[in-house]
Image: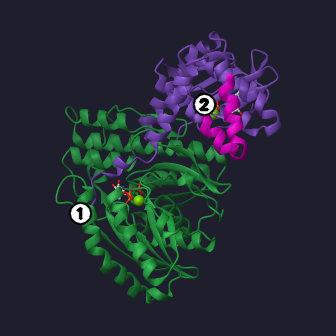
Amino acid sequence: MELIAKGAEAEIYLGEFLGVKAVYKRRISKRYRNPLIDRRINLERTLKEAKVMFSSIREGVRTPALYYVNLREYTLIMEYVEGLPLSKLTPSLLLDYVRDAGRMSALMHRGNIYHGDLTLNNVIASKEGAFIIDFGLSGFSNDVEDIATDIHTMLRSIESIFPSISESVKDVFLSGYKEVAGSETEDIVTRVKEIRLRGRYVEERRNKPHNVE
Amino acid sequence: MKVLGIESTAHTFGVGIACDEEPYILSNVKDTFVPKEGGMKPGEVARHHSEVAPDIVVDALSKAGVTISSVDGIAISLGPGLGPVLRVGATVARALALKYRKPLIPVNHGIGHIEIGRLTTESNDPLILYLSGGNTIITVLRERRYRILGETLDIALGNMIDVFVREVGLAPPYVKAGKHMIDVCAEKGSELVELPYVVKGQDMSFSGLLTAALRATKNHNLNDVCFSLREIAFDMLIEASERALSLTGKREILVVGGVAASQSLKEKLDVLSEERDVILKIVSPEFAGDNGAMIAYAGLLLLKHGVRINIEESYVRPRWRIEEVDIPWS
Ligand SMILES: Nc1ncnc2c1ncn2[C@@H]1O[C@H](COP(=O)(O)OP(=O)(O)OP(=O)(O)O)[C@@H](O)[C@H]1O
Ligand SMILES: Nc1ncnc2c1ncn2[C@@H]1O[C@H](COP(=O)(O)OP(=O)(O)O)[C@@H](O)[C@H]1O
Ligand SMILES: [Mg+2]
Ligand SMILES: [Mg+2]
């Protein structure tokens, strides 16, 4: 098997499963992490990713098909999707895929699924369209907060990866989203603005205890 | 070129002098307000700052061995911070600029933290962790702005551990002999208590963790709760940082802000940097917490690029975000 990518938390190998090309996603232990926390997280996320990938496919979101789960090795075996993550595309190719990523995200949210790490890195541009991957931080919820957090992370990833054209790319993402989510998009966008203000420096937060040397 | 910088956004009133050649920082004098009990009241802090201000300005000049007439500009941290406290520093800075006919330079406090870190650690194109009382931000400099890659979705990590140790009666003081009370308490614990670990991409959320930890003290050993709270909070931060490293491919991490003084955080960051094969740089304690030198140095960089502000327009900016600042030296 060939190592094709090293994500933030997993190693991705390209191999075969029952005769077809397959991706092996293996979560690796982190030495900096407390060992108990490490095991708990790797197990939880492998399970969560498997569960949510199934549901996501059921909602009609382009998601790699899941072939096999090996919990002991924190490994998922799934369909290989050929293509680059959107973060690596040239601006000219980007927009159509970003619009599609918007549609896929809205479909996912309509199924009460939030992704938890929705960024340009976790969407693959394939011949068929935009595929959403990397569901380790996802979950089920219909809370507008969880959904808006997804949109917030996507918009911010656009800003940090394509700063010079970010306004138009964000607009295209949101218009794709709106094609599916319709008028609900307004409420979500309002919440995104709130989240952005909240994480940001708020005056009251300074009004905190002082510390003494 | 020399710049006198004034820090006055929160608990610390500080004055520093920076110049554009070795040793860059000529002096760094500060006085930190210590409330008798509880939190900070803006009015009290402002009073403290206005009382100590004249002496600190004089002291900073004499330690640097320069006269006010020989400096090329007066830098002031106009925000973010508490309005009444910001206005004390701003008033002093405006007065100096007017009286001695010096340009007034508007400095963002967070940019000060970052730039003094870059200078004193000689870092080169780092992923920056800005960890302080009010901020938990993962950022990189790109196309003339500090771009935020990740941050807290609610309260800052530093604030969270401060509130925890205060609520359980271990503080104030929050830090003794360079060690935070959370560390003092955690070192006697070892059992991991289940507490929420919340990372969303490169963002973190600490408020649920704080609530759960406070609740857990009712039926668990306090040292174990301290230990678990610290482990989980730091692991969340390191994971978010690792994601940002993998996103950007940066080869260096720079840690700035008050929490940079934490030894236990450094231990985890050391392991991360080994695993990812990146260089770790942590600002020294002298420049980690709020100080005037950082404002002077950021002001020097700004002045070199022609940034200054008219006194009539030099309003304080309590909510000024680092990504709003144009960085011409990038
Ligand atoms: N040794 C230490 N270990 C851990 N935390 C520490 C240590 N020393 C200071 N801190 C933390 O640093 C924080 C204060 O940092 P700093 O002075 O940079 O923040 P601030 O200026 O109040 O906030 P901001 O920069 O966001 O405006 C506090 O939360 C404090 O508990
Ligand atoms: N099914 C797949 N088909 C093709 N490439 C994939 C697939 N899954 C992951 N990858 C590649 O591996 C990278 C990391 O995978 P990801 O699931 O996002 O792991 P991590 O959680 O570590 O980020 C992706 O950005 C992508 O390039
Ligand atoms: Mg990923
Ligand atoms: Mg500070």
Q: Which chain is green?
A: B
User: In terms of depth relative to the viewer, which is nearer, B107 or B208?
Assistant: B107
Residue A54, image x and y in percent? 61, 13
Comparing B116 with B97, the one in front is B97
Position of residue A37 relative to residue A128, above or below, is below
Is residue A53 left or right of A128 when viewed as pictured? left
Q: Which residue is mark 1?
A: B34
Left or right, A184 with reference to A133: left
Location of residue A101 in the rendering, given as x and y in whole percent from the top left corner: 69, 25
The label number, if any, that marks residue A151 in the structure image? none
Amino acid beneath label 2: Leu
- Chain the render paints purple: A
Residue at point 72%, 42% (across, down): A165
State yes or no: discs 2 and 1 in contact (Cβ < 8 Å). Answer: no
Query: Which circle marks residue A118 in the picture?
Result: 2
**Residues rendered magenta in the picture:** A154-176
- Left or right of A57 in this view: B311: left
Q: Is residue A206 above or below residue B118?
A: above
State the SS at label 1: loop
